Image: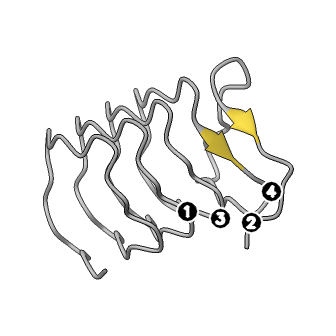
Amino acid sequence: MDLRGKTFVGADLDRADLTEADLREVDLSGANLFACFLTGARLDGADLRNACLDGAFLVGAELRRARMDGVSMKGATYDQATVWPDDFRPPKSDATLWHGQSR
């Protein structure tokens, strides 16, 4: 699913299946991405400031250059293949590193 450059400011995407979606440069600031499936999603350069990623599944997601100030990640799951922005580390008290196979 190619959503490059779209705007979803404050959108309610609760439980959306965005597996392998191309979300590069998408504005998701303030969006509700609760329990979204973002496995393998490309979020390079996305604006996720103040977004809710609580319970999201980020296994293999690419978030290079994503803006993540104020993002909430309680119960989110990621793995070693998840690529974070250089200046961001997932909060260990909130997000869980998954040790299973990603594909």
Q: Residue at x 82, y 63 (%)?
A: 101
Q: Is residue 67 above or below residue 51?
A: below
Q: Identify the residue at the far right of this view.
A: 99
Mark 3 — residue? 60
Which comes sooner in the sequence, label 4 or label 1?
1
Which comes sooner in the sequence, label 4 or label 2?
4
Which comes sooner in the sequence, label 4 or label 3?
3
**How would you rate the neighbour count of disc 4 (Cα within 10 Å): few for under 14, some for 14-19, many for 20 or more?**
some
Q: Do the residues labelled 3 and 1 touch (CB within 8 Å)?
A: yes
> Quick one: SS at disc 2?
loop
- Name the one closer to the observer, 101 or 80: 101
Q: In this view, does 4 lie above or below 85?
A: below
Which disc is residue 102 wearing? 2
Q: Distance between the residues labelled 4 and 2?
A: 9 Å
Q: Give the colour scheme shown.
A: secondary structure
Q: How far apart are marks 3 and 1 (CA)?
A: 6 Å
Choose top left, top right, bottom left or bottom right for residue 1.
bottom left
- 90 sits left or right of 53 in the view: right
Between disc 3 and disc 2, the foreground one is 2
Mark 4 — residue? 80
Which disc is residue 39 wearing? 1
Q: Residue at x 42, y 31 (%)?
A: 71
Q: Do the residues labelled 4 and 1 touch (CB within 8 Å)?
A: no
Query: Where in the figure is residue 89, as x and y percent of width and height?
Result: 67, 38
Q: Do the residues labelled 1 and 2 touch (CB within 8 Å)?
A: yes
